[in-house]
Image (spheres, rainbow, N blue to C red):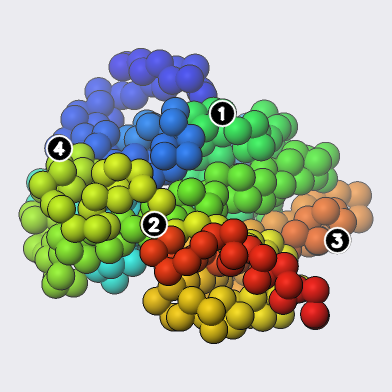
Amino acid sequence: MKRIFDPIHRFIELSPGEAALLDLPVVQRMRRLRQLGLAYLAFPSAEHSRFTHALGAMAIGTRAFDAIVEHDRALFSNEREIVAQRRLLRVALLLHDIGHGPFSHACESVLGKRHEERTEALLSEPSMRSRVEGLEVEPDEVLALIVGSPDARYPALRELVSGPNLDADRMDYLQRDSYFTGVVNGRYDAEQLLASLRLIDRNGELVLGIDGRGVVALESFVLARYMMFASVYFHHTTRLFERILQDVLHELWPDPHALDPIEEFLRWDDFRVLNELNERQSVAATALRERTRLYGLAAEFNAEHDLRAFEACEAALRERFGDAGIWADSQSQLLHRLPLGIDAPGSRTVWVTGPAGIVDAREASDLIAKLSGRVYWRKLFVARSAGSVAEARAICIERLATL
């Protein structure tokens, strides 16, 4: 066994076959992809990679699976089946982020192709399929778990890999991002949450749920997500420079197919983008290189009922500075909203077992019920070239006073 030390999970063990998989260039490339993109401009220690996150997700996902087996072993057909499912889960979690591009979400916004599509292409490569099959794992089953296919053979494993609520991806990145940003809001009671995981039969399908004694741990998990989105993922500095980065990426890749075929995609990572940035003299490239804030924050609105206020301020700023003079960072863009998952369209709830039977998590917890919808973070920025940020803020204050 190979042992890798990790600040979140202490150490992570890999079999010889898993270690060989880890050494593939497509997996090693994740070392050159930051987990939080440009968040290091606001949180200087947030330099961790998707590589370490993938290892962490595999580690905590394995612990989750082992906890489920310990309590619900009778639901598995035999020991061989347990070993096979565990092996499949570990490979899927190790590979779940291989399809990410440089500065992932900005890349997806510019090129219009989601990382799951790249992952499918990579898992179709003969060399990758051969290596995965060498671990006695079927590549198509790995892909089904990663993309959350409804046809996945094991629904509970699918939820652990790419589920809407209790997946290992979130379980690791909340702890890891909290640790490396220095923001404590991402901490939750991981030990209690893992110990509470159960397999629950819903309409003949075994899905992931929790024991009623773990509701407080589930609350801490949901609240940690809320707080990390508010404190880190949607931080105004990160959002500002991601907006500028998109302009740079449009310069680098004017054609949406610029990173096709997959061989060209693999040649790009965060480091290459930053190197290209150093060779460019455009306004956006210079601003990103020198950390020049081309926009200033005029106002932000963090609740659903603030939509009217947001729109009123946006209209007032557009009237004063023109359409080109402001940037409205709103829910109209995918990354500006937080789907907590408990009540997101098309997603499952978390089922909770207890003396009264199986209930929806919203019935078991007032806190989860209150955080069940989508939470929006809306921000209004003004271009410094168009006018004064102080003036923009004063306009917003004056406009809000009339509502």
- x and y percent of residue 36 in the render? 42, 43
Amino acid bearing label 2: Leu
Which residue, given by chain and number where applicable, does mark 3 sit on? Answer: 363
Relative to 96, residue 393 above or below: below
The residues bearing labels 2 and 4 have C-alpha atoms spaced at a distance of: 37 Å
User: For residue 294, which numbered disc appears in the image?
Assistant: 2
The numbered mark, 2 or 4, whose residue comes first in the sequence reads 4
Frontmost residue, 260 versus 95:
260
Q: Quadrant of the N terminus?
A: top left
Local secondary structure at mark 1: loop
- Please state which of the two labelled residues, at mark 3 or mark 4, is closer to the viewer: 4
Q: Which mark is residue 182?
A: 1
Whether label 3 touches label 1, CB < 8 Å: no
Q: Nearer the viewer, residue 390 or 11?
A: 390
**Crowd around label 1: few <14 · some 14–19 · many ≥20 (10 Å):** some
Report the Cα–Cα distance between label 2 and label 3: 46 Å
**SS at mark 4?**
helix
Front: mark 4 or 1: 1
46 relative to 359 in the view: left or right: left
- Residue at screen point 36% across, 18% down: 4
Separation of marks 4 and 1 at Cα, in angstroms: 31 Å
Q: Is residue 346 left or right of residue 324?
A: right
Viewer-nearest of discs 3 and 1: 1
